[in-house]
Image (cartoon, rainbow, N blue to C red):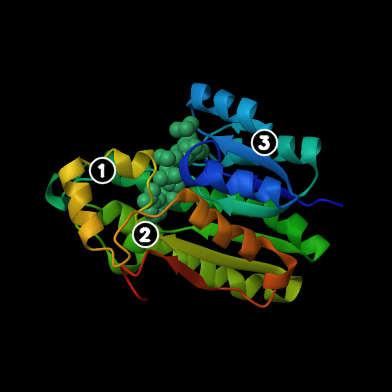
Amino acid sequence: MARTALVTGGTRGIGAAIAVALRDAGYKVAANYAGNDEAASRFAEETGIPVYRWSVADYDACAAGIAKVEAELGPVDVLVNNAGITRDAMFHKMTPEEWRAVIDTNLTGVFNMTHPVWPGMRERRFGRIIIISSINGQKGQMGQANYSAAKAGDIGFTKALAQEGARAGITVNAVCPGYIATDMVMAVPEAVREKIVAQIPVGRLGEAAEIARCVVFLASEEAGFITGSTLSANGGQYMA
Ligand code: NDP
């Protein structure tokens, strides 16, 4: 029987590529999103993947959203915590709101989504939790104290939870993309993007599909011996 996979922020960018790749690998897939109904409807129409709107920053909304997905598609066996935002500012200009928004979505959102699916995975003795962290959580990035803190926190969460899930057949892994050509990166001014590309040994931005392939691998039965790991996919920009 096909397993069910839930991808947060699964209607655009990297998440959309992950949702499609999991569908193509035979999973029943649900894609969550925050508020861009237009992009979500377009995605659902093009892919046939059902979309569900709630914010990962809201614990109760996550629990209710997951219950709806499970009622419609079956228990979530694979959770991809992909939803993320940036609110970049140099630290001396960063507001408490910018700090909180990024931590609430990129770090607390991972707790909010993982906590409700964890008991079921433990009972069924199978689960795959995959967290999309970032190269900037590994190396830090100026102008992103909030984002780097959240993404580094995701890696700590991955390593701790991997130890708790291991005997229950649940693996927990992080993928750390470098710069990928999505809305998030294309929103950066072109001159800055050119400087970024100059720092990437392979000489280009990554593609969302390249991150999706990492996720499909980590979600598979065959990846059961890999847990607590951090898979870097960054064109050689940072060799952690
Ligand atoms: P995009 O901005 O292209 O897409 C973000 C997705 O996340 C959208 O579907 C958005 O929904 C959703 N989302 C945002 N906030 C919430 C929320 N509170 N609750 C639920 N869904 C939410 O992002 P990318 O594809 O570029 O990034 C995906 C992940 O990869 C992020 O975690 C990001 O930090 C990480 N990453 C990205 C890199 C890159 O180069 N692009 C590099 C390294 C890591 P909606 O459409 O409704 O707004």
Residue nearer the viewer, 96 or 22: 22
Where 143 falls versus 184 (above or below)?
A: below
- Label 2 residue near ligand 1, CB within 8 Å: yes
* Figure check: 233 above or below 192: below
Residue under numbered circle 2:
178
The image quadrant of residue 178 is: bottom left
Mark 2 touches mark 3? (CB < 8 Å): no
Q: Which residue is mark 1?
A: 96
Q: Element at badge 2?
A: loop
> Which residue is identified by label 3?
64
Q: Which residue does the image show at 52% across and 58% down from the upper left?
A: 131
User: Is 215 left, or right, of 150 in this rendering?
Assistant: right
Q: Position of residue 141 (x, y in %)?
A: 24, 60
Decide: few, some or many residues near mark 1? Use Cα within 10 Å; few <14, some 14-19, many ≥20: few
CA gap, disc 1 and disc 3: 28 Å
**Looking at the image, is mark 1 or mark 3 earlier in the sequence?**
3
Q: Does dot 1 land on a helix, a strand or a loop?
A: helix
Quadrant assignment for the C terminus: bottom left
